[in-house]
Image (spheres, rainbow, N blue to C red):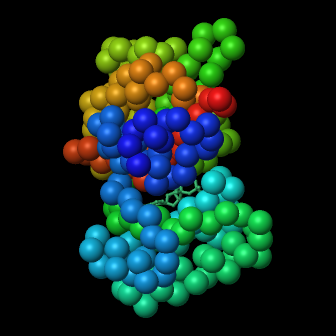
């Protein structure tokens, strides 16, 4: 699919479509491919190299792991094949009506500091970018910062520094530090992407894995404006 074909459809883009679009805009995402069958999932896994991750791909399933739709760390063809069957059978149970395109296949990214970048629409200010640490810090503590699009490099730097969890990014205790300038760059690229594609209503990069040399999104979701 071309960029304009993807953007002309008013809907929630799947993880595969969202990542494809983000990649075209230079936003770093884990290499991700769609497999329509079990056989294809195995052959793509071999191409990518083990260990891999499989995730359900359906426009009707938004929270993939809540429904048994994510399998991490599959080490060989047998594990991929079994995981494919298990994902499909839990989908049949939980979402019998869901239109399923298949699974996404991607490398298992090594652990990093989990951060999130999101975009939502403010009725007064238009698109707003959010940054925060992933997991419990965002869900429970709501430790996030916001800026209105367009976001400059300086804005991005400030929004990263102003979260309470910033010491975690500096490598508090056991963690390797996050590359702050890679995160700034990612936020600025997201801002540019949103500015130039006003039909994007919402965007979620959750999580992004931050490392000492780079940052890469392992999950992505884009919602387009109706019509
Ligand atoms: P959901 O739709 O439930 O948000 P995600 O794609 O975010 O599904 O996957 C759930 C979790 O699995 C992520 O929060 C992350 O911790 C882990 N994960 C997802 N993709 C990868 C990957 N490619 N490598 C390593 N861990 C991953
Ligand atoms: Mg996610």
Residue 26 spot, x, y in % from top left? 29, 37
Front residue (pair 97, 155)? 97
User: Residue 73: image x %, image y %?
Assistant: 42, 74
* Quadrant hosting residue 86: bottom right
User: Residue 9 placed where, x, y %?
Assistant: 57, 39
Residue at 32 percent across and 18 percent down: it is 153
Identity of the residue drawn at 53% across and 80% down: 84
Residue in view at x 49 percent, y 71 percent: 36
Hey, which quadrant is residue 226 in on the image? top right
Q: Quadrant of the C terminus?
A: top right
Which of 135 and 46 lies nearest the eye of the viewer?
46
Q: Is residue 112 above or below residue 202?
A: below
Residue 88 lies left or right of residue 184; in this view the side is right
Point 52% across, 87% down: residue: 82
Give the farthest residue toward the bottom: 78
Answer yes or no: is residue 101 visible. Answer: yes
Q: Is residue 144 visible?
A: no
Residue 65: x %, y % from top left: 62, 63
Residue most extreme to the left: 213
- Write down the quadrant of residue 156 in the picture: top left
Number of marks drawn: 0
Q: In this rendered view, identify the residue nearer to me: 26 or 181.
A: 26
Q: Is 73 or 103 nearer to us in this picture? A: 103
């Amino acid at each position: 699919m071309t960029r304009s074909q993807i953007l002309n459809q008013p809907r929630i883009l799947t993880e595969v479509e969202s990542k494809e679009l983000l990649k075209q805009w230079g936003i770093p995402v884990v290499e991700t491919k769609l497999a329509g069958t079990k056989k294809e999932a195995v052959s793509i896994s071999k191409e990518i190299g083990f260990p891999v991750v499989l995730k359900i791909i359906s426009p009707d399933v938004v929270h993939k792991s809540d429904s048994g739709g994510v399998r991490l760390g599959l080490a060989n063809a047998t594990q991929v094949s079994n995981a494919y069957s298990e994902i499909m059978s839990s989908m049949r149970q939980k979402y019998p009506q869901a239109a399923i395109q298949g699974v996404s296949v991607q490398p298992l990214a090594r652990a990093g500091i989990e951060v999130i970048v999101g975009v939502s629409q403010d009725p007064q200010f238009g698109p707003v970018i959010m940054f925060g640490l992933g997991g419990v810090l965002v869900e429970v503590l709501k430790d996030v910062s916001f800026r209105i699009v367009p976001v400059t490099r300086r804005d991005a730097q400030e929004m990263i520094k102003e979260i309470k969890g910033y010491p975690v990014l500096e490598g508090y205790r056991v963690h390797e530090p996050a590359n702050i300038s890679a995160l700034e760059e990612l936020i600025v690229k997201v801002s540019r992407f949103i500015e130039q594609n006003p039909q994007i209503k919402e965007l979620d990069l959750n999580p992004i894995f931050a490392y000492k040399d780079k940052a890469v999104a392992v999950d992505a979701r884009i919602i387009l404006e109706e019509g």
